[in-house]
Image (tube, rainbow, N blue to C red):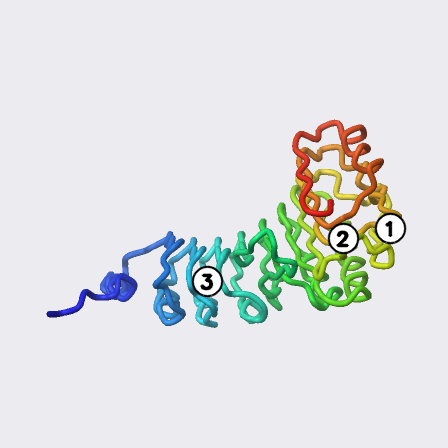
Amino acid sequence: MVADPDPMDAMINFLKSLGQTYRLNVLDLGGCKGLKTSHLKSICNMVSLKYLSIRNTDVSRLPPEVSHLILLETLDIRQTKVWGPDMKHIYLRKLKHLLTGPKMTTEEETIRGAGMPRLIGKMEDMEILSRVQVEHGMKELEEVGRLLKLRKLGVVLIGSQSQAQDNMASLLQVMTKLRDCLRSLSIWVTPPPTNGDPSVTVNMVMTQDYAPKLLESLDIRGVRFLNTGLPHWIWALQELCEITLCDTFLSKVSLQDLGNKLHHLRRLRLLRNS
């Protein structure tokens, strides 16, 4: 009895059978648990692709051949095991949407993200940069500051307390540069503070004049603010309609101020130790 062919192998064989004049623009493999890195290498020969999703698959490595997809505009690797250095060598000049971040449970303390592509500053069409990991703040984030079309930014700041503070200072500079385009901002610091330890704080000082005043959504996790109060520049974000907080250990007064001072606020999500 002949065994049934592997579905992913069959798909790859089908793609190979397509003529060179066939232009495949969209390939959504979300949820395909049999997908392997070897399959991805073959997929990277489909140079006409503009959209590629391997979301929620078993893929653990991103082959360097991904850079062959020179027309790619959206790359979705969320809920995969691809994180850390795999993204650093990727250069996709036309990329607009880079969606990353492993699948996590609510109990997990350590937040992870995909590594920041070294040439991110040259991907000038980027509009969404989601859950990228920042280890060397100034160098990596300086490149992000060149993306003047960026609407949504999500970063994971990792390292010791001093590293987190340095990375935060670099991030604030980026927020200033992108203040006329950013609509959504997610800041996750790992490891997060525990038990509200007052010695573990992150300073987010920035003048209101340079705040990204067009922000509509703000997600902050793992940042314990100085004196349990919110940064003053937040009150300049009068377009904010959605806020998510986790491990911020805010005072009751600060939480009340969110409702009293941000008049467009429609949704406030208070997660663990907010």
Q: Amino acid at mark 2?
A: Val
Q: Going 77% across and 67% down the picture, which residue do you hit?
A: 160
Q: Indicate the quadrant where residue 14 lies.
A: bottom left
Q: CA distance from mark 1 to mark 2?
A: 9 Å
Secondary structure under tag 2 reads loop
Return the disc, 2 or 3, that comes first in the chain's sequence. Answer: 3
The residue carrying mark 3 is: 70
Residue designated by label 2: 223
Which one is in front in this view, the residue at disc 1 or the one at disc 3?
1
Vertical arrangement, residue 48 with respect to residue 249, above or below: below
| Residue positioned most to the front | 195
**In x, y percent, where is residue 161?**
80, 64
Q: Which label's residue is closer to the chain start, 1 or 3?
A: 3
Q: CA distance from mark 2 to mark 3?
A: 37 Å
The residue indicated by pointer 1 is: 226
Q: Residues within 10 Å of mark 3 (few under 14, many from 20)?
A: some
- Amino acid on which the number 3 mark rests in the picture: Ile
- The amino acid at mark 1 is Leu
Residue at x 78% of width, y 58% of height? 168
Quarter in which the C terminus is drawn: top right
245 in relation to 197, above or below: above
**Residue that lies at the very extreme toward the left in this rendered image:** 1
Which residue appears farthest toward the right when viewing the image? 227
